[in-house]
Structure formats: structure tokens, C-alpha cells
Image (cartoon, rainbow, N blue to C red):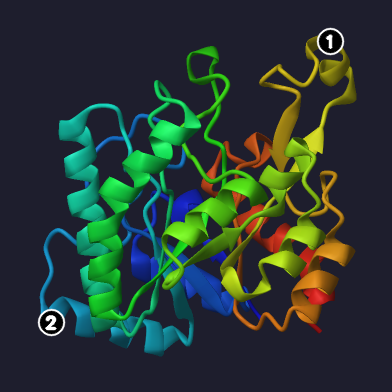
Amino acid sequence: MQLGFVTAILPTLGLEEILQFAAGERFDCIEVMCWPPGKSDRRYAGVTHIDVTDWSHAKAQSILQVTQKYGVAISALGYYPNPLDPNPQVRETIVEHLKKVIQVSPSLGLKTVNTFIGRDHTRNIEENLLLMKEVWSPIMELAHKTGVRIAIEHCPMLFSNDEWPGGKNLPVSPHLWREMFRMFPEGLGLNIDPSHLIWQGIDAARAIREFKDKIFHVHAKDERIDQDLLYEQGISGLHWHLPKLPGLGDVQWGPFFSALTDAGYHGPVCIEVEDRAYEKTLEDRKRALRQSRNYLSQFFG
């Protein structure tokens, strides 16, 4: 396995600066954010370290040269919007950008794009499955043609009462993963993240064992369950679980990595920092990556 990080936590740095930092801190790889240039409507979105809207062979070669310069690989390109947005115009814009991310990947020697399936939170699960089939069939057709695998992160994207109970990302559990893979059996897999599973009460190690052939990418993020808030709000509350750095939450990392190694996973594991305690300054964010690397290094030898 290769240890890396998601570049969203370093939005003020350019790609070469990030690669220089990664090399100096002994990271193997980075997952590079590819949002459309511009503002975002939520945290960790809208970060553009590779702009796929202005693409050329020369730009691809320039990026390849700088990754070779620092000896740090790109694990995947990342873009995490809602491709099933209720607004058809917004949905179309998102899908077109996702297609661009897929199309540029081969020119960078990449075979994986990380994203969300999305969800229309105004519709039920059955209606969303039909919408997924409609929206994602042409996306997967393009992915097949370009030789790119799509790794779906399973975050429920549930942050407000307006999004309760379904959130804005459909495949959030093993039951729905099976539905997703029945619909698209080839070229679609998981970007698995234990932090989302722990607060849902889903056994991450068991999920790895069941879906071992569908794990294309891994995120390393922890989650702390606030037992006092859980008592106050119950499981239908929204704020009793908090993203933390690996080792500072309730994820059982030993069984998690044991399951990954038993499954024969040899791919990237990218630290995803969403811990508010480490966000005030650029140095705090860099410290978060160093601290996470130090903790996780015990599983990498």
C-alpha cells in the first residue's frame, strides 16, 4: 500500500508546492482535487489543484514532469459533487465536468477517478436508483471507453435537517452498494472510508471482506462519537459524530488494516483531513498531515 493524502486540505498551495511538501514528508502519493475553478458551497469543495477545463498535451506533460521531479505519484483525480442534483441544469453541469475529469485521466497515466454517485434528496431510494441508472449510464460508458475506473466514496453527505434522512449521496451502505454493483458490475468500485461507516454502525472490516474486489481506493479519516451528544440527540441527531485525524477517534485501525491486507489490497491509502482542530493556519493543516502520517506509519512498515 502507498500512503498519501487528499489535497483539499491545502487549498492555498499550488500543485508543485503540494508535491514538494509531500516529498519532504515522505508521502508516496496524493489524491488531487479537480473542482471547476470558482467558489464552493461547502467545506473542502471547490479546490482546484488540476484544472481540467483548460487541457492540452503540453499541460499533461508538465504535470507528469513535476510528479517525476518530486517522486510523488498521483493516486487518483478527485471531484465530489452531487451528480443527481434535483436541478436538471445543475446536474448537467456537474456531469459534464465529471466527464472532463475522466477524459483527462489517461493523459496523466491514471486509471482512477474518485467521486460521489449523488442523490436527489427530494426522492425516495427507488426513485433515486432509477435516476442513477439514467444519469450514470453515459458516465460509465465514457469511463469504459477511456479505461478509467470510478471509485465511489460512500459518505452520506448529511449535514442539515433539510437533507434528513437521506443526505445527498445514495450508496451509503452495503445494501445499496450491492444495488449499485448490480446496475454497473464493471468499472465501478469503492473509495472506502471507515469514518463514515463507524457512525452508521457498519462494520468496516466486514465490509472490506465482502467487497474486497471492489475496493479501488481508500481514505484514512477517523470519527469520534460524542457520547453525551448521542445521549441528548439520539441516533436521529446530526452532530454527535465528529471527523478527526486517524488515531483521535473511534475507528479500530488495526482490524481495518488487517482486513485490507487479508483482502490483498495494495493500492493507495490517502489521509483526508476534516478535523476542525487543525484548520486555523496552513501550518496546522501541514501538522495534521504529519501527525496522521506518524500514526498510520505503524501499518505500513
**1 to 152, vertically: above or below:** below
Q: Give the spatial CA distance, label 1 vs label 2.
A: 56 Å
Residue shown at the point (57%, 43%) measured from the top left: 155
Q: Residue at x 62, y 75 (%)?
A: 213
Q: Is residue 85 left or right of residue 177?
A: left
Q: Quadrant of residue 115?
A: bottom left
- SS category of the residue bearing label 2: helix
Quarter of the figure with residue 146: bottom left
Q: Residue at x 53, y 52 (%)?
A: 179
Q: Looking at the picture, which amino acid does disc 2 mark?
A: Ala
Is the Cβ of the residue at disc 1 closer than 8 Å to that at disc 2?
Answer: no
On-image quarter of the N terminus:
bottom right
Instruction: Please state, as top left, top right, bottom left or bottom right, where the C terminus lies in the image.
Output: bottom right
Task: Say above or below: 100 vs 109.
Answer: above
| Within-10-Å neighbours for mark 2: few <14, some 14–19, many 20+ | few
Question: Which residue matches tag 1?
Answer: 232
The one nearer the camera, 75 or 85, is 85
Q: Position of residue 38 (x, y in %)?
A: 23, 40
Amino acid type at image mark 1: Glu
In the rendered image, the vertical position of residue 268 relative to residue 158, given as above or below: below
Residue 15 location in percent, x, y?
Answer: 35, 66
Pointer 2 residue: 58
Q: Which comes sooner in the sequence, label 1 or label 2?
A: 2
- Residue at x-position 61% and y-position 49%: 273
